[in-house]
Image (cartoon, helix red, strand yellow):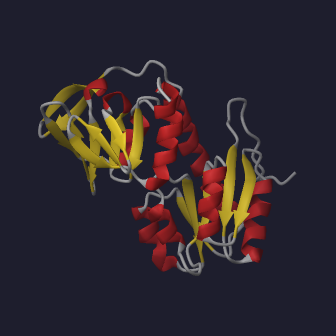
Amino acid sequence: MDSMTALPGKNTPLMRCLVVDDEPFAIEGITDHIGKLNFLHAAGTCSSAIEAKELLREKDIELMFLDINMPDLTGLEFLESLDNPPLTILTTAYSEYAMDGYRLNVVDYLLKPIGFQRFFQAAEKAREVFMSRSSLQKNDELPQEMYIRQGDSFMKIVWEDILYVESMQNYLKLHFEEKTFTIHQTMTSLEDLLPKDAFFRIHKSYLVNISHIDMVSGGRIFIRGKELPLSKHRKDELLNNVILKKLISK
């Protein structure tokens, strides 16, 4: 066995991987690297972003290896189009795209040709992020009360009272019944802190408290008279996993 091959610990979850690249040789190389790590599993490969989008709808993917330079739709354009992308490691032969990758909150950025040692470092980083998120999701003792910074003060809030969260670039607006707070945080980091069964990402810019949804109509959601956009890519999941489970009339 390769000296760099990693064996998963007793509680290490398996990460299903998708490799997206228009070069068969590159796909083969990454898939071969994945096979050396027992905490990774190659669940699928695609030669274009369009194929990848369809596969992401069909399979649960925890980690995506995404090439940047592809025809029709680049890796960066594809990643920006996803409302809830899996953990992503970018792969490319061009170093000038690094800043774009980190802007999109990717796990790591690998330059081709990709050696196994560098691949292993990126995969380990992805595993750490994945395990951290998994731990938060399994935490059944999430406190109802949380604190947010407001200037030099710390304000206590109750997450159940949040109606919805609105993304404003590097800031978030927390909307309550009678007040709104602005905090300096990313949507992804806040989403990781809130209970997964209580909040749903309806759009790249909106996270809603499911218990406060008054109506879903077409591509819109209504909360306390406020009309919010519902992404067409998230609509089916909302209807199937949230609304239909609580439907009392057909």
Residue 208 image position (x, y, % from top left) = 34, 38
Q: Quadrant of residue 155?
A: top left
**Above or below for 235 versus 25:** above
Total numbered circles:
0
Residue 109, position in %: x, y?
54, 65
From this view, report whether residue 199 is shown above or below residue 221.
above
Is residue 199 visible to the viewer in this orientation of the structure?
yes
Whether residue 197 sits left or right of residue 90 in the image: it is left
Q: Nearer the viewer, residue 101 or 210?
A: 210
Residue extending furthest toward the right: 1
Q: Nearer the viewer, residue 93 or 190?
A: 190
Q: Residue at x 72, y 49 (%)?
A: 40
Residue 188: x and y in percent read 40, 47
Compared with 80, 154 (above or below) is: above
Q: Residue furthest top?
A: 141
Q: Residue at x 55, y 74 (%)?
A: 68
Seen from the viewer's position, the closer of residues 80 and 149 is 80
Q: Residue at x 54, y 60 (%)?
A: 108
In the image, is 51 to the left or to the right of 175? right
Let me know if residue 121 appears in the view: no
Q: Position of residue 177 (x, y in %)?
A: 17, 30
